[in-house]
Amino acid sequence: MNLGSKLKTVVIGKSRDLSDEGLFHKLSLIAFFAWVGLGADGLSSSCYGPEETFKALNGHIYLSLLVAAASVVTVFVISASYSQIIELFPTGGGGYLVASKLLSPTLGVVSGSALLIDYVLTITISVASGADALFSLLPAATVSYKLAVEVAGVCLLTLLNLRGAKEAVLPWVPIFLAFVVTHAFAIGYAVCTHAANFPDLWQHASAEVATSHSQLGWLGMALLVLRAYSMGAGTYTGIEAVSNGLPILREPRVQTGKRTMRYMAISLALTVAGLLLGYLLYRVQPQTGKTLNAVFFEQLTAAWPRGAALPFIVVTLASEAALLFVAAQTGFLDGPRVLANMALDRWFPSRFATLSDRFVTQNGILLMGLGALVLMICSRGSVDFLVVLYSINVFITFSLSQLGMVRHWWQERRALAGWRRRIAINGVGFVMTTFILISLSALKFFEGGWITLVVTGLLVGAAFLIKRHYRRTTLDLRRLDDLVTAAEADCPKPVAAGDAPAPLGPAFNPHAKTAVVLVNGFNGLGLHTLFGIFRMFPGLFKNFVFIQVGVVDAGNFKGAAEMENLQAHLQAEGQRYENYLRKRGFYAEAVSAMGIDVVSEVEKVAPRVLARFPQAIFFAGQLVFAHESFLTRFLHNYAVFAVQRRFYHEGLPLLILPIRV
């Protein structure tokens, strides 16, 4: 093992074995760990969401009771609607797939692009907010190091996620539990110590509402409450994460996903409502240099002995700071998965759907980390600036997802019992999320929110350009489909029970010249390469071996059943090549392998083939574009050249036959 491999093993971890029967069990998350990894984003928003809401009331603090009630209802409505999405898309739904399948591919790419930008912002604002909270506990002289700490935080999270989802979540469990325990205690303590004063609180609230009515009128009050409700929209941004992250959950995934969603909804609703109630009970007022949570905890413990109050405040605020770092996990867990799904549909380069030897979407993780780093440096970690950009995009996805589900239930109303309840849940969710989207866009647009919308629009435009290129390439390759049609007409039909077997062709002769062809299925590309061998070397080769690697990517790495299906597909495709050649008097074999990297798998298979066929020469086909550019090199797979370099290093001949596009 060279130095680079040793360093990689230390930093990222050892390669995982695809043949390990317990692989999916080892990689998946139970509901509790999923709550930590995916729920931290929502819970961490309680560090700033309730504060934004409370400040937006402009001193009419008793109206916070209405906002708290509306927030609780919103959390449970959105979580219930996403539970229905989990049921309908058991292999992983999320806003991109829901909008693509239930509305249109165009709206799907808008939803997916909005989510990608939102997840980059989630990483950036979570780390920046965490650093702000951390440095508020340190001497003012240390603030000059804040940006460096933020950059280091993004890099550390990127490395952790390259190791794997579970490895990235487990270190944060103590921090998550510390946050939950301290905040649950603070809210419970505030409520219990003021329980006897609740009748007075209700009277004060009635009097304050009357005063607000005299000052603002009913319309003014309603607009103020709605504005405060919209400003706390960041509270709901993590709810969609579970439906996106279903593939990393423990089987049965639907039950695990719904259980995780319940954990998230209950904890988030209680925390947000509890903090707003706590602000009201202690009549918390903003103080320069302190968050409202910090002021609340100080007033909560004012009567405690200093030896108990100070440690509680420090631990509680430290857990908030740390949880904000943990919240960035949502962006790293779900962002690359959305990107992979879009890559599988050819909206983005297919390389973003490939997996590393740790079975994570490495390219997507690196892209999310790089995007967060660039945004962090450009904004210099300013939470005030980042919070303006945040939240808008996720409500684009929320609204489209709810609309898609409403349409689905309406179309299925004749065949589905209980459709009225289902459509009501998603319908209410659509109204709520669309209202918040419009409000946020209006409130934040001229403050800088337009930047988010412009960047999202540019990403959507790039996706359409990439899709157009792939579509044109597919159309150009349609001519090769005629080869498959002709070959299928000549191939013998599959052998049925009781029928005579298909002709086996000549006997195996290990000393005969052998053409070993690298293929990716019984398709025009493979047949074009095969016919090129016939044309260039007529009558030379008597044996033909077809090597096919089933690439395990984000699209099929979803369970043991998917792996079995992939293996069966490889065998069926290889059998078609064997039948075609044997009927023409050649000896033919098909060899298949499964793995994440074509080059490595071919390199493993080649020695076995050479041991059986010592007179072998390797062949592969490669697309050649009339106008080669950076775009074509970036969007297409040039693995065959990497195989050629490996083979040349071992002294093995590999001929690449061009396929002009």
Image: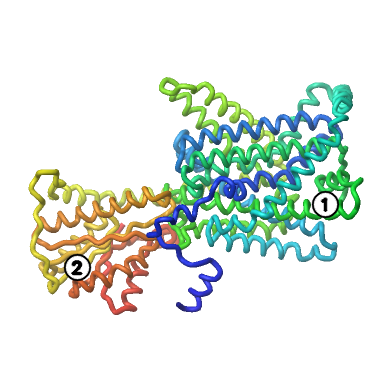
Task: Classify 10 Å Cα crowding around label 2: few (below 14), some (14-19), many (20 and above).
Answer: many
Q: In the picture provided, is 166 more to the left or to the right than 42?
A: left
**Residue depicted at 75% across the width and 31% down the height:** 67
Q: Which residue is mark 1?
A: 313
Image quarter hosting the C terminus: bottom left
**Of callouts 1 and 2, which one flags the residue occurring earlier in the amino acid sequence?**
1
**Residue depicted at 88% across the width and 41% down the height:** 285
- The type of residue carrying mark 1 is Ile
- The type of residue carrying mark 2 is Ala
**Residue depicted at 71% across the width and 65% down the height:** 148
Q: Which residue is mark 2?
A: 515
Q: Secondary structure at mark 1?
A: helix
Image quarter hosting the N terminus: bottom left
Q: Nearer the viewer, residue 1 or 187?
A: 187
Q: Secondary structure at mark 2?
A: strand
Q: Position of residue 619 (x, y in %)?
A: 25, 67
Image quadrant where residue 641 sits: bottom left
Image quadrant where residue 159 sits: bottom right
Q: Position of residue 407 (x, y in %)?
A: 49, 27
Q: Nearer the viewer, residue 248 or 579?
A: 248
Mark 1–mark 2 distance (CA, rounded to whole Å): 73 Å
Number of the front mark, 1 or 2 = 1
Q: In the picture provided, is 273 more to the left or to the right than 110?
A: right
**Residue depicted at 45% across the width and 53% down the height:** 24
Image quadrant where residue 637 sits: bottom left
Q: Which mark is residue 228?
A: none
Work out whether residue 212 can be spotted: no
Q: Position of residue 144 (x, y in %)?
A: 79, 65
| Colour scheme | rainbow
